[in-house]
Image (cartoon, rainbow, N blue to C red):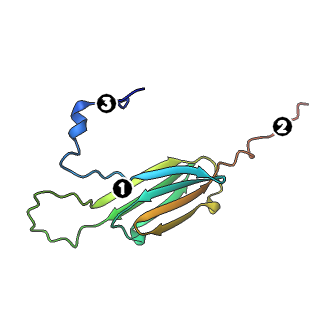
């Protein structure tokens, strides 16, 4: 069993020690012929989140503006994230009209149908 990630670098272990990470945390699972992507987006509003499909990739993006924050604060530690984040998932050739998304209590849930493999299964007659 490998305990260290493939690209392990001791210096990078401390990159996010004092600063927050902008990563969007997601769970991806399969159930009943669909794939589900659940993304945690605490503090985000539905209007700040978008989901799109293009060339086999499902893209989830969000932006949280901190413009309402007071500018003359002298932060000792700032852990809340402001800015944009994006995750892309390769989902293959799907019927994008069947993709659905729901945003509730800071969690985005996207339902994606499994890849349509029937399109490529074809017998070609040899003459």
Callout 1: helix, strand or loop? Answer: strand
Are there few (<14), some (14-19), or many (20+) residues within 10 Å of tag 3?
A: few
Per the model, the C-alpha gap separating discs 1 and 3 is 24 Å
Callout 3: helix, strand or loop? Answer: loop
Front: mark 2 or 1: 1
User: Which residue has dot 2 on it?
Assistant: 123
Q: Which mark is residue 8?
A: 3
Q: Quadrant of the C terminus?
A: top right
119 on left or right of 25 = right
Residue 68 position in % (x across, y down): 22, 73
| Residue that appears at 88% across and 35% down | 125
Residue 45 position in % (x across, y down): 38, 70
User: Which residue has dot 1 on it?
Assistant: 85
Per the model, the C-alpha gap separating discs 2 and 1 is 44 Å
Residue 52 position in % (x across, y down): 51, 59
- Which tag, 3 or 2, sits closer to the chain's start? 3
Vertical placement of residue 45 versus 37, above or below: below
91 on left or right of 81 = right
Q: Are marks 1 and 3 in contact (CB under 8 Å)?
A: no
Front: mark 3 or 2: 3
């Amino acid at each position: 069993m490998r305990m260290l990630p493939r690209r392990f670098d001791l210096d990078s272990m401390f990159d996010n020690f004092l600063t927050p990470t902008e990563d969007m945390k997601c769970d991806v699972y399969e159930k009943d012929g669909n794939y589900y992507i659940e993304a945690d987006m605490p503090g985000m509003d539905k209007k700040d989140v978008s989901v799109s499909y293009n060339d086999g990739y499902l893209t989830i993006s969000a932006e949280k503006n901190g413009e309402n924050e007071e500018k003359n604060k002298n932060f000792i530690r700032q852990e809340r994230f402001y800015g944009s984040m994006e995750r892309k998932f390769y989902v293959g050739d799907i019927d994008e009209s069947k993709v659905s998304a729901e945003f509730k209590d800071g969690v985005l849930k996207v339902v994606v149908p499994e890849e349509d493999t029937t399109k490529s299964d074809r017998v070609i007659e040899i003459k």
